[in-house]
């Protein structure tokens, strides 16, 4: 439980004393993961295999550029060979599919991700593009094969999407056991909400997934021991929705205007932190919570993929 910051009790609005949340630091937890991976990569050197990752980007979105540069930095730190290939936004879907096929065929690359969203002037079928990545190199866990395995509980032979995998690591840091708990996931995206549901389910939670058509999300959230929010709506979840002492994981990254900042904006999550902090038992901050864990889990999946390739080459399965 190295990454938790324990805070003291605070007076609540009724004059009684209530414990305020412990912050679960993704910065600290991801650092531990990267240190562990670096050791593993160093140990692999005797086999002459260096885990390698290719990030394919279509177009030049500013937010994607930032995410990719943090992936490149983490890879360098861990000792993963990472390559960033940027295709122009005029590329056609066929050209993207051909680029993916070439990487699938290249035995020196263990992990391939296509950065989303695709920034193209041409129509792109995102599903077709993500499914073109070989399931054996799909370290984002977004192909139907990996998503299908996860949905059936076949967790050991698939790649688990990085954000939900990072959320599970953060929940693990609290010492709160998932089995038998009631978990509520807000959002059902392919990259966060849907795989988060599956992961909690196969770790034996009872899971409710809320989405834009769910009636009375606040009531659902109020029943949850564990809440994971990936809704894409700034500060949507309020403290008074929460069951006291719950574990609250915020996957949101939203920009709101803030005249006091030189940039004129600041980043907030999908949780209204100030009120939730008074009521949750554990809470992730934004920034510094789930974000760095997503990157760390991508590194982990890449190392796992390299180990699997090595084992296959040696004629036995990991
Ligand atoms: N865009 C934002 N987050 C992600 C991610 O985890 N993977 C990919 N491929 N694209 C993203």
Image: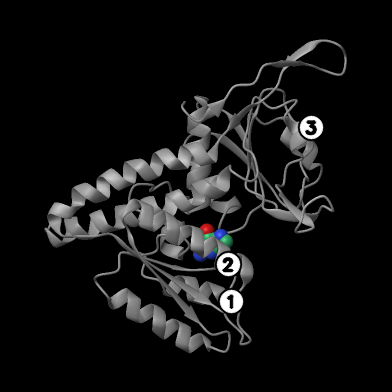
Residue 35 placed where, x, y %?
35, 42
Which numbered dot is residue 275? 3
Instruction: Please tell me whether mark 2 sits on a helix, a strand or a loop.
Output: helix
Which of the two marks, 2 or 3, is nearer to us in this view?
2
Give left or right: position of 113 versus 311. Answer: right
Determine the image quadrant of residue 305: bottom left
Residue at x 52%, y 48% (from the top left corner) = 292
Give left or right: position of 241 versus 152. Answer: right
Determine the image quadrant of residue 286: top right
Residue located farthest toward the top when viewing the structure as drawn: 16
Mark 1 sits near ligand 1, with its Cβ under 8 Å away: no
Residue 63 visible = yes
Mark 2 sits near ligand 1, with its Cβ under 8 Å away: yes
Residue located farthest toward the right when viewing the structure as drawn: 14
Residue at x 19%, y 58% (from the top left corner) = 310
Residue at x 55%, y 58% (from the top left corner) = 191
Q: Looking at the image, in which quadrant does ligand 1 appear?
A: bottom right
Instruction: Please tell me whether mark 1 sits on a helix, a strand or a loop.
Output: loop
Task: Identify the residue position indicated by label 1 in the image.
Answer: 60
Q: CA distance from mark 1 to mark 2?
A: 7 Å
Instruction: Please tell me whether mark 3 sits on a helix, a strand or a loop.
Output: helix
């Amino acid at each position: 439980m190295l990454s938790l910051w324990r805070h003291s009790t605070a007076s609540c609005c009724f004059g009684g004393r209530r414990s305020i949340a412990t912050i679960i630091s993704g910065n600290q937890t991801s650092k531990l993961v990267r240190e562990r991976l670096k050791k593993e990569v160093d140990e692999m050197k005797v086999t002459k295999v260096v885990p390698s990752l290719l990030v394919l980007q279509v177009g030049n979105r500013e937010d994607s550029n930032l995410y990719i540069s943090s992936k490149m930095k983490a890879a360098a730190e861990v000792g993963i060979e990472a390559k960033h290939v940027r295709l122009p936004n005029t590329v056609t879907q066929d050209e993207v599919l051909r680029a993916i096929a070439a990487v699938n065929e290249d035995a020196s690359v263990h992990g391939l991700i296509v950065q989303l969203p695709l920034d193209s002037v041409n129509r792109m079928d995102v599903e077709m593009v993500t499914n073109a990545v070989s399931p054996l190199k799909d370290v984002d866990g977004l192909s139907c094969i990996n998503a299908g395995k996860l949905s059936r509980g076949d967790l050991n032979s698939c790649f688990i999407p990085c954000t939900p995998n990072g959320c599970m690591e953060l929940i693990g840091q609290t010492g709160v056991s998932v089995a038998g708990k009631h978990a509520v996931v807000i959002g059902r995206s392919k990259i966060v909400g849907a795989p988060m549901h599956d992961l909690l389910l196969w770790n034996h939670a009872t899971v409710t997934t809320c989405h834009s058509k769910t009636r009375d999300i606040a009531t659902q959230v109020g029943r949850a021991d564990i809440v994971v929010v990936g809704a894409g709506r700034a500060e949507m979840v309020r403290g008074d929705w929460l069951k006291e002492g719950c574990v609250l994981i915020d996957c949101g990254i939203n920009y709101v205007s803030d005249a006091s900042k030189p940039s004129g904006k600041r980043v907030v999550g999908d949780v209204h932190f100030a009120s939730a902090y008074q009521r949750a038992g554990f809470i992730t901050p934004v920034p510094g919570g789930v974000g760095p864990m997503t990157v760390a889990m991508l590194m982990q999946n890449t190392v796992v993929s390299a180990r699997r390739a090595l084992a296959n080459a040696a004629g036995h399965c990991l």
